[in-house]
Image: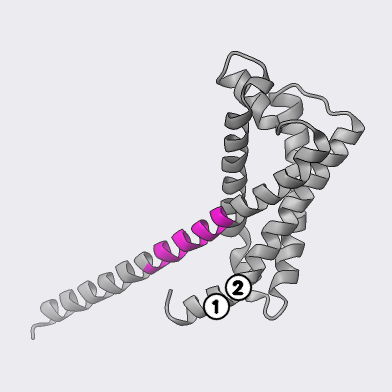
Amino acid sequence: MPIDAEADLLDREEMELTESGRTEKAIATGRTLGRGLVGGLISTVVMTSFRMPIAHSLPPTSAFWARFVGDGEDSDYPLQGLVLHLLYGMAGGGLFALLFEQRVTESGHMDEAYGTLLGTVYGLLLSEFGIHVVLKRVLRMELQSDERFVFHLSHLIYGVTLGAWSGSRAKHRRDEHAEGW
């Protein structure tokens, strides 16, 4: 085989391996995101189930909907607010998975504990972001101290749930990785 043909064959084989690696990485990233979306959904349901009977009010996403999409009061949009809240929670779960899943998976035998620790920090950061950016700046809402406490506690519950759930999936992820996914 001439040298040029041999080099061309090696280049094609290398490109196929690179493409295969990219495809596997894309599949793995999609699975990570999917697990995060599911974890975010579960965590949002838990958080909302805790918050609503205590706060006796809709999530702030109803106020967001009323201000930017609707033309009424937040109490006019309970379903839209809840759906938007679930979607935000799912997006937060997807982001958590993309940022932290590999760290939780690599942590070893304390998967749930490490995931819960990361989730706790993540939930508190989301809560601070929610208070200072979403509520104060975007919605121009000021929570009273008891409302703020429930808001922070709710997001802590979200983070703890998300982190523990993510950690509980670590063995499955390690098995996927061992199989080449």
Q: Tell me what residue is drawn at x 64 percent, y 26 percent.
A: 64
Single out the residue that lies furthest toward the top.
Answer: 71
Q: Secondary structure at mark 1?
A: helix
| Classed neighbour count for the residue bearing mark 1: other residues with Cα under 10 Å, few (<14), some (14–19), many (≥20) | some
* Three-letter code, disc 1: Arg
In the picture of the structure, the residue carrying the numbered disc 1 is 174
C-alpha gap between disc 2 and disc 1:
6 Å
Confirm whether the magenta stretch covers residue 97. no
Q: Is residue 113 above or below residue 86?
A: below
Where is residue 83 drawn, in percent x and y?
57, 37
Q: Is residue 10 visible?
A: yes
Confirm whether the magenta stretch covers residue 25. yes
| Classed neighbour count for the residue bearing mark 2: other residues with Cα under 10 Å, few (<14), some (14–19), many (≥20) | many
Single out the residue that lies furthest toward the bottom.
Answer: 1
Locate residue 163: give its quadrant. bottom right
* Three-letter code, disc 2: Ala
Q: Is residue 27 above or below residue 38?
A: below
Where is residue 173 drawn, in percent x and y?
54, 73
Q: Is residue 79 above or below residue 74?
A: below
